[in-house]
Image: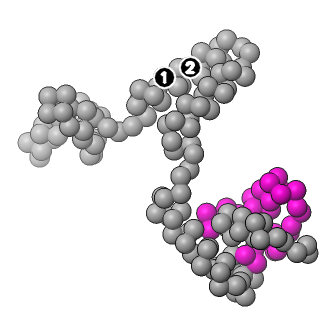
Amino acid sequence: MAALKEPVKIFIVQALACRDTPQQVVDHVKQEFDIEISRSQCQAYDPTKYSGKNLSEKYVQLFNETRKKFDDGLIDIPIASKHYRMRQYDKLLNKVKNIPMALKIMEQAAKDSGGQFTNKIENSIKNEISYPSGLGHFYGRKSTDSESSS
């Protein structure tokens, strides 16, 4: 078992706190730091596991803070950001050599930027946004129609 430097330990603790599996963390450590670690060595940095019961208080606190931020949604997941997705579409579009694939990427980007993948319904008369409840919107009924028919 190799002695790990501080940045590697922090990386492992935070990755485990973000609910990555030990195998994923092992792979990321190899990729990021070019260091081979075992899954059991990795699990020693997870205070929720038996092998992590002797983890120093500093890392336990870091784990708990990171886990709370992750669970509360405060740690951004890049794919959830429209800006990030548009950049990825652009990168793919620049790499692709075949026209049908380029057209599919452009169509996907247009759908994504146009808000096609949301449940928001904009009411232009009242200038407000509502979210559908139930299946009434699916069958073409307005919310008042479904309430009056009940």
* Residue 79 belongs to the span the image colors magenta: no
Whether residue 33 sits left or right of residue 14 in the image: it is right
Residue 27 visible in image: no
Q: Is residue 31 left or right of residue 92?
A: right
Residue type beneath disc 2: Met
Image quarter of residue 25: bottom right
Numbered disc 1: secondary structure? helix
Residue 19 highlighted magenta (yes or no): yes
Question: Real-space Cα distance between discs 2 and 1?
Answer: 6 Å
Q: How is the image coloured?
A: one colour
Image: magenta residue range: 17-45
Disc 2: CA contacts within 10 A as few (<14), some (14-19) or many (>=20): some
Residue 84: x percent and y percent? 56, 38
Residue 137 horizontal/vertical position (percent): 26, 36
Quarter holding residue 54: bottom right
Question: Type of residue at label 1?
Answer: Ala
Q: Residues within 10 Å of mark 1 (few under 14, many from 20)?
A: few
Report helix, strand or loop for mark 2: helix
Residue indicated by mark 1 = 110
Q: Residue at x 80, y 59 (%)?
A: 29
**Is 87 or 132 nearer to us in this picture?**
87
Q: Residue at the spot x=78%, y=66% of the render?
A: 8
Q: Which residue is pictured at 86% across the width and 67% down the height? A: 37
User: Residue beneath label 2, please?
Assistant: 106
